Amino acid sequence: MRQILLSACLLLTFAAPAAIAAQSPPPASQLLNKIPQNILDGLDALRHDQPDQVESSWKKGALANLDGISFSLRNTKDELGEYHGFDLVSLQDISPRIRVIYIALNYERGPQFKKFVTYRNSTGWVVLEPIINLNTADMASVLAARPTN
């Protein structure tokens, strides 16, 4: 009986943490590496206050009409203040070729949430549909489905 209890304790001590680790979401750095380069280039241009370059980067190879992004970003800056960087909210691989990315653009007075639906074609990842601005109510379902740490 003592050996059974000892075996059970050892199993719980070593096997349970491994099982939990196997279920945890990948580290943020791994997910950031999955953001397509054209989106990252646009985010870098936004950090340097270059909205025209943001639009150019995000439109690169896009299958959707993305005209007006720079105008929208200028309005957002007027409304929310200076841009301070971004947070990856969620990244979902829907299939090997379709990826949905939710990003919070952090401004002085609050965030703006963006949704990118991307597609991997023979030349790389491109934006499949217009980039959508989401409000916090729209984000509820995204946040509910997101794995927690």
Image (tube, rainbow, N blue to C red):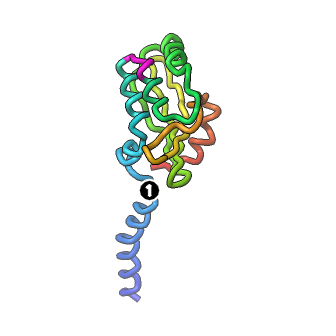
Outermost residue to the front: 122
Reply yes or no: does residue 1 show up in magenta: no
In what element is the residue under mark 1?
A: loop
Quadrant (top left/top right/bottom left/bottom right) for the N terminus? bottom left
Relative image position of residue 55 (x, y in whole percent): 47, 23
Residue 59 versus residue 14 in the image, above or below: above
Relative image position of residue 121 (x, y in whole percent): 48, 47
Residue type at the position of mark 1 = Ser
**Foreground of the two, 19 or 80:** 80
Relative image position of residue 89 (x, y in whole percent): 49, 39
**Foreground of the two, 103 or 95:** 95
Residue at x-position 41% and y-position 21%: 53
Reply yes or no: does residue 51 show up in magenta: yes
Residue at x-position 53% and y-position 15%: 71
Q: Which residue is mark 1?
A: 24
Characterize the magenta stretch by its predominant secondary structure.
helix
Residue 148 versus residue 22 in the image, above or below: above
Q: Quadrant of residue 107?
A: top left
Q: Is residue 22 left or right of residue 66?
A: left
Magenta stretch bounds: 49-53
**Foreground of the two, 138 or 47:** 47
